[in-house]
Amino acid sequence: MTSVGAPERRYPLREWFKKLLTYWTLIAIVSAIALAIFADVGEDVAEKSTGPLDNAVRAWFLAHQNPTIYKIAAALTSIGSPTVMIIVAIAAGVWFYFARGRSKAGVIVAAPAAGGLLAGGLKVLYGRARPAGAALINERTFAFPSGHAATSAAVMVTLCYVLARERIISWPTAIVIGGVVPLVVGLTRLYLDVHWTTDVVGGWTVGLFVAAMSAALYERLRTSEPSAAEREDAPPAG
């Protein structure tokens, strides 16, 4: 029995979890998972031991191809291309620059550049050939990891994270959009027969890692940079 006026020292379980599960904890967990999955998949790709999985999934998609869905997949994969994702990121970055502050603009614009550079460097490092379908649409670069999957994940996850943290959209909406867009883009790469399954998984993990690093940068700058509203309220210098 506590004395009158004494502070309550027992904390509800929910409060304990709230103190434990900070945004930094989430970022650390996501980045660790992304690195672990990429390391595992990358090792298998380097050892050329992914054949059973890659060939089985490829055979399933080839068996279910038809001209109409192929055209739809080609359109969706174009929308999710690195070029379009860069345009989306720059447009969002410009809006955030003027409306919400420079740090938000920076992390959004940096995400596709970082994701694209990292994926491109890894492609050269692994030097993996694409499936036969890549020649039909003039896909000439190496296969692993998928640049489409990496860039779409980097941009959309970063953008949705910042939008949710700024309370522009809800967290459930952010999770759905940030998850569905890279998922669809990755699946179109498999349907079009321009990537192996492990290419897409590798791309998703690269993009997720870049998004986690972008989120970490956002959190770091968020505490040190005033928002647009705060800058307007600040007294004039001098």
Image: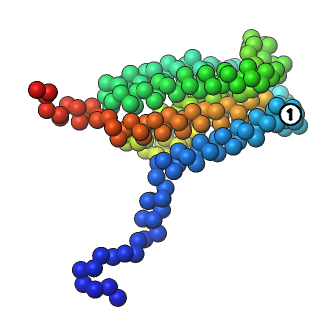
Q: Residue at x 66, y 25 (%)?
A: 119
Colouring scheme, one of rainbow, by chain, secondary structure, one colour: rainbow
Q: Quadrant of residue 139?
A: top right
Residue type, numbered disc 1? Glu
Q: Residue at x 33, y 76 (%)?
A: 8
135 relative position to 89: left or right: right
Q: Quadrant of residue 103?
A: top left
78 or 14, which is in the foreground? 14
Q: Element type at marker 1?
A: loop
Return the residue at label 1: 47
Q: Is residue 28 visible?
A: yes
Q: Is residue 56 visible?
A: no
Counting from the top left corner in percent of width and height, residue 79 is at 58, 21
50 or 36, which is in the foreground? 36
Q: Residue at x 79, y 36 (%)?
A: 43
**Quarter of the image where the C terminus is located:** top left
**Quarter of the image where the N terminus is located:** bottom left
Q: Quadrant of residue 180?
A: top right
Tell me if residue 220 comes above or below residue 97 in the rendering.
below
158 relative position to 169: left or right: right
